[in-house]
Amino acid sequence: MDIIKPRTLSGFMELLPAKQARLETMMDILRRTYASYGFAALDTPAIEDAQILLAKGGGDTEKQIYRFQKGDSDLALRFDLTVPLAKYVALHYNDLAFPFRRYQISKVYRGERAQRGRFREFYQADIDIIGDGKLDILNEAEIPAIIYKVFKGFGLNRFQIRVNNRKILNGFYAMQDLAKKSGDIMRTVDKLDKIGPAKVKALLLSECALEEAQADEILKFIAITGTNAQVIEALEGYTGKNEIFDKGLEELKAVTANLAAFGVPEENFAVDLTIARGLDYYTGTVYETTLLDHPEIGSVCSGGRYDNLAGYYIDKALPGVGISIGLTRLFYVLDEQGLLNPQLPSAPADALVLPMTGDPAAAIALAEALRSNGVRVQLYGEQKKFKQKMSYADKLGVPFVVLLGEDEIAQGKCSVKNMATGEQLLLTAQEAAAHILKTLADTAGPVILEK
Amino acid sequence: MDIIKPRTLSGFMELLPAKQARLETMMDILRRTYASYGFAALDTPAIEDAQILLAKGGGDTEKQIYRFQKGDSDLALRFDLTVPLAKYVALHYNDLAFPFRRYQISKVYRGERAQRGRFREFYQADIDIIGDGKLDILNEAEIPAIIYKVFKGFGLNRFQIRVNNRKILNGFYAMQDLAKKSGDIMRTVDKLDKIGPAKVKALLLSECALEEAQADEILKFIAITGTNAQVIEALEGYTGKNEIFDKGLEELKAVTANLAAFGVPEENFAVDLTIARGLDYYTGTVYETTLLDHPEIGSVCSGGRYDNLAGYYIDKALPGVGISIGLTRLFYVLDEQGLLNPQLPSAPADALVLPMTGDPAAAIALAEALRSNGVRVQLYGEQKKFKQKMSYADKLGVPFVVLLGEDEIAQGKCSVKNMATGEQLLLTAQEAAAHILKTLADTAGPVILEK
């Protein structure tokens, strides 16, 4: 038979089992955390009608889209989870209870130029809360509080959710009579972290055609830093001049106050006036999340408040707030940085049962007994030498091997070997399950371990 | 803004939240059961190089494939999880420990003619065990034992895993000097359930060009039925004439004996000599699973033993055994038959916390306290009338509403209303969590409820 050399497409993540186990753990944490806040799991198709998916049209995204014909159909793979959500909410509007809260953890597709750390197929893990006509500001604090829980659940501590409010920015620019230029200005200001204030000022003068005094005013504004209380105090100095600004500050104060009520410590969130999120889509609170020791990778979780989720599909005002974790990229970066906890067992089983007799019936019964007590068990049925069996257990990285020979069967027990310590105990199935689970619980750690 | 009418492509399942919750429960059961048997989670890309995916080529499948160009690349969406597994094992051969056990629950794509109950995007939930050179017969009993656990976990009782062995069939046809025609014969015999023995005989004579005596011998053979012990006893009568037959019978006996050891009751599995699985791929034990009250839907879970997983990609003998549940179709059928348990709560939250005061801080703290005790909580922050809030709770189908007004706050308690019984209790957060979880546990049922 002719052999075709197997390969996986460039830009598509395909993990070996031990790493996949860690990614699965992160997905479990995401699902459990999102569910604990009352979000419904949603699963939309990966393929949509291209006309519908691209209703908004234009932009860089369109070039990256996987679009193709099948029969008469013009099809495209989803490039994010927001457009399919908009379609879903518009299509099923009459069947949904609003506020509608959903999470979706699914793959999306973008045919970007292949480069290290960029993926063409990647998981997004999104939550959104959609209101019908109105949506309370409380939701804008809850969303980052959930992200805080997720990241802490992963084992991360050195991260910061940065919060701003588009109304503050829009109001501020309106005060300076720069409302029409605000989009260009925000895009320029967004480069502050990368190019510094002097170059931002130069660009504001050259590309945005601002006057020197206007540019200085903007730089002074975005230079407002400090504790959240200090930033808010400084912003109070701008109130009374523009309604939108005042409304934005009121929202920002509500969000920061409620974030504290949700138990998010001040060290993990910061009001940051440079955050704008490029998209016009956002109209209120906006979020970015950075890993404090890895600012170079940019935001790993972003989102914000929008006023009109599904205007392309339905004649209803559907305001919402949402946030998205680029899970594949985050996982890739954490792995690259060596932050995946090597102590966390990554074998598919907690225990490998090795039958040492001809008839496997006793070993089958033992394995079933361990499973019914909550242990993940692989029964090893291959006819190999003992040494080969133990070397398989080593390669798998299984924490326990359970041996069952004639002696053990006669005593109604099994020999449980801890592969890390070498300790071997003669136990009943019940005792073995308890011993294995307790040992694993005692040595359990987070999936991410910061250095 | 021009509005584009939203729609979801025909042949693509998109569920409302309550149904999605039930599908998610089934996926959880699948993941937990597969993991409890030591299978590693695997996640391969949905897009593969078309040349590689279609290495085997030909067949009906190829016409159904979603294949398209992006830049210079000839791409295709996976149409099953077996070919990507073969690619994965060949590509990562040196990094895997064999036997390699993996599960994958992922969407696959087939551009079939759209018809009721047929899907173009659907979940398969596969397990496979791959050996390097050899693989013990014990695995061929473990696979259907796991499927038994999954189906029981769903709440199904009226199902039967039907087992046969291709060596028995091949050996039997060799005895009749019909080895060369065995493929055609098996395809004809496979129609027995649908068209009956008389028409099968007619086809054997006309299409397979058998002699009358040969056709009679075949009909006599496939008419062997009864308990598993009776079928095996009848098969013993054919031994001693063909080595392959004898080997197959030995395997079948081992599988049935071990299935019993795994705790699978006789009523849920049956030796059935008419099962062949059309593909030449299978070489030993083969499986089909039918819902006893719905034979018309055919097999909902099929698979078997194969000798050569990845011959197109690697020059290694990689025998394996695997089985696949067509989850989307199974879910569709169970729903159509009205078998989804309506008593099972399907709301995204166990409790809806309704703040009755201006400042949400106390309600936020209460919601967090309930969550940290394991309750899924939605905090309702909208400014609506009480009646509207309760009607939202009704529409969501949330089992408990937790009210927090000034009185409750003053007492350090909350009012917990059971939406099914109307009972309302004044409890601390701790007591409320315990009460909610206990009530839900007491009323919990399976996701599928047979009539």
Image (cartoon, coloured by chain):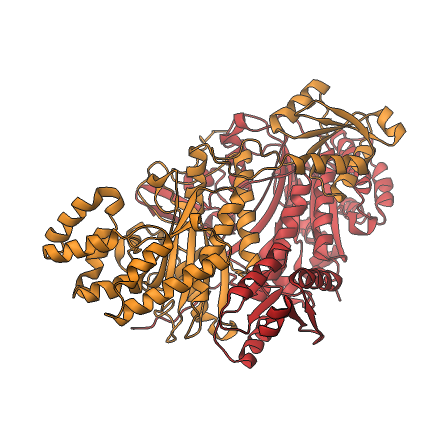
Chain colours: A orange, B red
Rendering coords of residue B79 (x, y %): 50, 48
* Residue at x 68% of width, y 36% of height: B179
Q: Is residue B155 left or right of residue B405?
A: right
Rendering coords of residue B410 (x, y %): 61, 70
Q: Is residue B302 left or right of residue A298?
A: right
Rendering coords of residue B349 (x, y %): 59, 63
Q: Is residue A356 above or below residue B393?
A: above
Who is closer to the viewer here, A238 or B9?
A238
Q: Is residue B164 left or right of residue A307?
A: right
Residue that extends furthest to the right in the rendered view of this protein: A410
Q: Is residue B107 left or right of residue B299?
A: left
* Residue B178 seen anywhere in this rendered image of the structure: no
* Residue A277 seen anywhere in this rendered image of the structure: yes
In which image quadrant can residue B431 be found? bottom right
Rendering coords of residue B381 (x, y %): 50, 69
* Residue at x 65% of width, y 21% of height: A391
* Residue at x 58% of width, y 37% of height: A445
Q: Is residue B395 above or below residue A427?
A: below
In which image quadrant can residue B307 be found? top right
